[in-house]
Amino acid sequence: MNTSKTLVYDGSFNGFLTAVFVGFEQKLTHANIQKNSQFQSGLFADTETIFTNIDKAQRVWNGVRKKSNSAVKNIYFAFLSEQNTIEALLYHYIQKLMGGTYLGATDFSDTSVLKINQLSHKVGREKHRMEAFVRFQLTKDDVYFANIEPDFDVLPLISKHFRNRYADQQWIIYDVKRKYGIFYDLQTVEVISLDLTDIQTNSIEKSNAFTDEEYEYQDLWNNYFKSTTIKSRINTKLHVQHVPKRYWKYLSEKKEAV
Amino acid sequence: MDFNRIKEKLNILADAAKYDVSCSSSGSNRKNKNNGLGDTGNGICHTYTEDGRCVSLLKILLTNHCIFDCAYCVTRKSNDIQRAAFKIQEVVDLTINFYRRNYIEGLFLSSGIFKSADHTMERLIAVAKKLREEENFNGYIHLKSIPGASDELMYEAGLYADRLSVNIEIPTISGLKLLAPDKKHEDFIKPMRKVKDEIIRYKEERKIIKSTAKYAPAGQSTQMIVGATGESDKDIMYSATHFYKNYKMKRVYYSGYVPISTDSRLPSLGSEVPMLRENRLYQTDWLLRFYGFGVNEILDADNPNLDMDIDPKLMWALRNLNHFPVDINKAEPRMLARIPGIGMGSVHKIISGRKYRSLNWEHLKKMGIALNRAKYFIICNSNDWERRDLDAATIKGMILQSQNGKFKNQYNNQLSLFN
């Protein structure tokens, strides 16, 4: 009996859930689920291409939800971590969740549970960081624009936070690494992709796209940041721990330091 | 707007406000209304200063002109510094523009006292009112209650602010007399009591009428300066407990005194900020609020000060060895929380983990427990545990040997050979 197979899906979360559905349908004990963008065929592997099917995905999702609410969050967050073998790990986790007679989602002495939990924690931390580190710049078209470069694909997670908070201004948050962004037009949030030739990360070179006032406010913010520091308590190690250097180029108060 | 003038004022007035340590923006439940601007939630630190403190609010003084002459304060009347004052509209514009760029969670507005307490309080309220009513701003607002402000004004302030705070500054009444002779203890307490009473009243009313307006939803906080008047840790923690209990404080902050004057009543310029002591006080504060300790268990007449070389929980455990060892797999949560090296996060993990299997050292280590401290106080599913009958001093010595804290050079008496 065939218990191992390579399943290729389109990279979307629903695509992944469909693949899980197919895996369960064919009773695969091991499913090597791969994104079509990174697909590598094994020498003797049996390969099947998965077409995303919302109904099937929904059935898997509802099944998980019935088992455990914390698992719902953990699976989605861990999926967004984009780790190399995350699909196989999640497949195993869902198998365990569905097959188990008890609720395994809090059993931290199990390796896959602990691993998924840790990954989900990491993604959650990145989400929180992005809610903190987004720095909007006002363009001449009256849109607040921000570039980000998060470690994980957190745009889907932060859109609600920004929608609730900045309900009366148009804004774009653009993921430079993954080349897509979200745009709020005062009504709804939409996914967009832009052709950005010059990414504004530099404090000396001013872009024409932004208003003059924009640079005045950045300057004020910079000044505020400096004058609020207590010189006799300087603790650079702690500072860098909280604001890791890889984010500095997108933070207006740290641009000079880059 | 004249940006150069604003920049000058911002530098002076942010510099003067930085000694207020409170920067929390959590605990409120104000939501965005009518598609306006902002909301509040769990609080976000948007950046950190180079001394490692969170920046979540625009923290400024409305003015640093002051009629008082408190020795510990930078903006005291007799200090020869540059003075400035913001217009109400300027503060509103700064807040809104910083907020729209996602720099901050809201505004923390304090002020030097000019003319009178009531006059100052009125101006602070005017800023908050303008933000709420004209700009439909739903972000976080923290206002200072000015000592001596009237009840009517304190009532109004709570309608617009999320949090109100009065800094008690000096934990002992005698210390206050010495350093701030023009201020009366009663003046600090009065606005605090009014706000507490109103919070309770609004809570009661909300139970009956759900649409009752919000009144200071994030509660009150206060701050004490540590190391300015020679007070003991016991004085500080007992008075903190008093405020938590009788005034329903959300937080008491401890601020190590940063020398800013040559006044002979105070530690001289250049003396070190007592950061380690501050750290120990916060640890004690946490034990009181989250770990179920009573203040008299940690500090009493025989032990008026905290140990600097070990944390307060370990200090308590070494004095009470009769409660140990604790069995990880059987003990109740209350007791788990009292084991040195185990935090509340680990307590929850142990409790959910031990439902599935009996835990051993390996499990505990993976959960992130500080075994170098905990191992002397626990037994688990293993034949290997501390069998020797060690006394407190020996355990303390062994733990100190095994750890390498960042403050080690401050309490280590051993001279270093190389360095």
Image (cartoon, coloured by chain):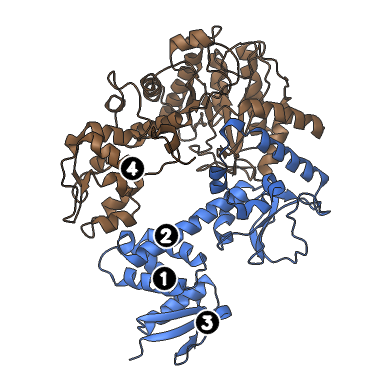
How far apart marks 3 and 1 lie (CA) works out to 19 Å
Tag 2 and tag 3, C-beta contact below 8 Å: no
Nearer-the-camera pick, A241 or B115: A241
Task: Give me the chain letter of mark 2.
Answer: A
x then y, percent, for residue B184: 51, 8
Mark in the foreground, 2 or 1 = 2
x then y, percent, for residue B330: 18, 49
Label 2 Cα crowd, 10 Å radius (few <14 / some 14-19 / many 20+): some
Vertical placement of B323 versus A59: above or below?
Answer: above
Q: Is residue B168 left or right of B46 when viewed as pictured? A: left
Mark in the foreground, 4 or 1 = 4
Looking at the rendered structure, the secondary structure element under dot 4 is helix
Vertical placement of A153 versus A203: above or below?
Answer: below
Q: Amino acid at mark 4?
A: Gln
Which chain shows up in brown?
B
Which label's residue is closer to the chain start, 2 or 1? 1
Vertical placement of B405 versus B110: above or below?
Answer: below
Task: Give me the chain letter of mark 4.
Answer: B
Residue A118 is tagged as 2
